Image (tube, rainbow, N blue to C red):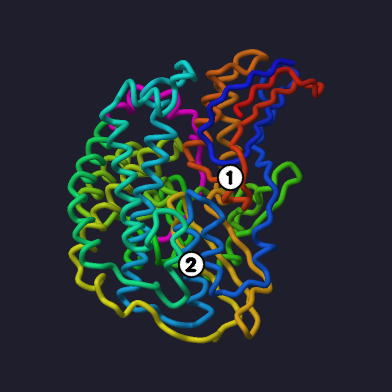
Amino acid sequence: MKKVKIPVTRIEGHGLITLQLGDDGRVKEARFHVTEARGFERFCQGRTIWEMPAITARICGICPVSHLLCSAKAGDAILAVRVPKAADKLRRLMNLGQYVQSHALSFFHLSSPDLLLGWDADPGKRNVFGLLEAEPKLALDGIRLRAYGQEVIEALGGRKIHPAWAVPGGVRSPLTPEARDKLAAGHPEAMRIIQDVISLYEKGIASWQEEIATFGNFPSLFMALVAEDGTWEHYGGRIRFVDEERNVVADGLDPARYYEYIGEAVEGWSYLKFPYYRDQGYPQGLYRVGPLARLNCCDRMGTPLADEALARFRALADGKAVTSSFHYHYARLIEILAALERIGQYLEDPDILSSRVRAEAGINELEGVGVHEAPRGTLLHHYHVDENGVLVKLNLIVSTGHNNLAMNRTVAQIAEHFLDGREVTEGLLNRLEGGIRAYDPCLSCSVHAVGRMPLKVQLFGPDGELLSERSRT
């Protein structure tokens, strides 16, 4: 047994990969275990719907806006209100800011060291600091782009992380003219950065063909919200499923009735549940969510530059669904462009300065579901309350959970292709991690735990003997 510890990690949460070899020395089984304990759904029982947006925002320091907004939407359903037009636009504006900051963090800080420095580069330099040394302009642009997304969040919620701003019925406060003008001043630079980076990614595609072919490249369903006319959606809309041909499998599904078409399986080797499309059963009903799924499901992005980028993205698969999870990176960049274009439109909309931002009501329903598209994929909060609005039961299906089956298949595909002999090499370890990282998983978010962020890979022989082990702590 050999153990190597490397003080570098670029996944969020506790993860363990096990590879089981058959008698022929080839990978027989690969599993991606999420080893944190679940708990948030239990200790939120007994809290009121008024507290839930601020509480669930603490599920994660990376995804607080996603949970804040989704929880508020579940509260809207329990109050049975339609939020004011200004509040709806402001919530959308904050979610777009979250897309910019979260996607920028994923691409520049977590993934670009592999893409630009190489999968087999020295792990001591294959990180954001190595990128800063090798590509200082790009690294600084990444910092500036993420900062702009955070500025959008702060301008609305008063802080960049854990803003206690969205509430059942609307939001606490409107945007001020001064904050709007500041955001407008920073918008052109953000637009320049994302267009430069998309061009850089497109030029690099030819050099990543082996990874593109093996990082989760398989037929599957894709699920996302789309607008009524099929346009890309990030906050409202209805659920659509498409297959690898981009044929619509199901459309116009009510997000509040998710349990009719999404099942949740449990395995004894992971704390993360395994959602699946009910009509195809488990595990055949594997589907993917997030940027790749949203671009595969929608008919158009709805903004000029993003629609042009979507056409180039679709050309990768001759108009069919792009099935390689490696291209989550590409889809993520296109979504930043779409988000920035929409932010620019909102900053010119006088409604966002309106003071009518909250609908007042009491408890009118004893059950409410909030669903929207977090950066990582479709997020769901389902609350049951008593007559006083106190939660008696809740269910959370987080974006990373939807992708659980797909991440496991991705790990298997990478191991089958890159495993050479009986030793877990640094190159294999990084590619396994990179395959998971393409989904931008938030493991702590998906199981509602906190802690450090290691990844461990174990390789077992046919007789169960531990042949090799490597870990990042």
Indicate left or right for 140 with 236 as reference. Answer: left
Q: What is the quadrant of residue 333 in the picture?
A: top left
Indicate left or right for 253 with 348 as reference. Answer: right
Of 464 and 316, nearer the camera is 464
Density class for disc 1 (Cα within 10 Å; few <14, some 14-19, many ≥20) is: many
Q: Amino acid at mark 1?
A: Leu
Q: Which residue is mark 1?
A: 443
Of 382 and 101, nearer the camera is 101
Marks 2/1 in contact by CB < 8 Å: the verdict is: no
Which residue is at 40% across, 66% downward? 236
Magenta stretch bounds? 202-225
Q: Which residue is mark 2?
A: 253
What is the secondary structure assignment of the residue under circle 1? Answer: helix
Q: What is the quadrant of residue 4 in the picture?
A: top right
Density class for disc 2 (Cα within 10 Å; few <14, some 14-19, many ≥20) is: some
Q: Amino acid at mark 2?
A: Leu
At which x and y percent is residue 461? 75, 20
The residues bearing labels 2 and 1 have C-alpha atoms spaced at a distance of 27 Å
